[in-house]
């Protein structure tokens, strides 16, 4: 083999690899650009519909509904706020289901931290 032909072969292989890499990245770039254009046009369409004069009042009512019914109802009160508003501490209780640790226990009291305390049992018996 001629040394010049070896260099030509290496040159053509490198040219093929670089063309393939360029084609791959340019294709990915075009896909990304078209997706960005699609997202922008979709957003502008939604904005145009939402800001239409006939849609301003329903949008305002929808935002008011979401704020009142969802956001304000799900907000947790801190300990200080609950004491000030109701005058007593909030009692967060979990369901009285035995834990997996107490399944095979032979003792009368399980290892579960959700068991009733003695004063709670007396309070339940009074009521």
Image: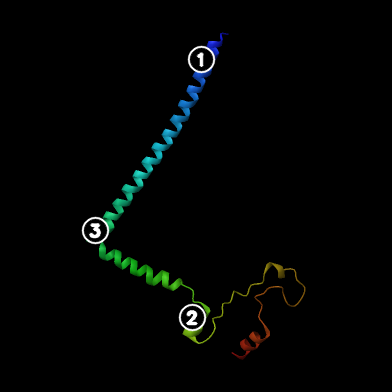
Residue 46 drawn at (x, y percent): 30, 54
Front residue of 54/109: it is: 54
Q: Secondary structure at mark 2?
A: helix
**Residue 81, numbered label:** 2
Residue 66 position, x and y percent, is 37, 67
Q: Please give the residue where the numbered disc 1 appears in the rendered image.
A: 8
Q: Residues within 10 Å of mark 3 (few under 14, many from 20)?
A: few
Comparing marks 3 and 2, which lies closer to the viewer? 2
Kindly give the residue lying farthest to the top in the view shown: 2
Residue extending farthest bottom: 126
Please give left or right for residue 59 compared with residue 97 in the image: left
Query: Residue shown at 53%/18% (left/top)?
Result: 10
Q: Earlier in the sequence, mark 2 or mark 1?
A: 1
Residue placed under numbered mark 3 in the picture:
52
Q: Residues within 10 Å of mark 1 (few under 14, many from 20)?
A: few
Q: Residue furthest right?
A: 106
């Amino acid at each position: 083999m001629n040394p010049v032909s070896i260099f030509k072969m290496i040159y053509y292989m490198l040219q093929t690899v670089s063309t393939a890499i360029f084609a791959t990245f340019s294709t990915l770039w075009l896909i990304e650009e078209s997706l960005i254009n699609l997202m922008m046009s979709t957003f502008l369409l939604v904005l145009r519909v939402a800001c239409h004069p006939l849609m301003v009042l329903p949008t305002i009512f929808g935002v008011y509904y979401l704020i009142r019914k969802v956001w304000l109802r799900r907000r947790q009160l801190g300990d200080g706020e609950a004491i000030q508003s109701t005058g007593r501490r909030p009692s967060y209780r979990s369901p009285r289901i035995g834990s997996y640790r107490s399944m095979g226990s032979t003792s009368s009291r399980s290892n579960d931290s959700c068991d009733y305390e003695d004063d709670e049992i007396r309070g339940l018996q009074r009521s």
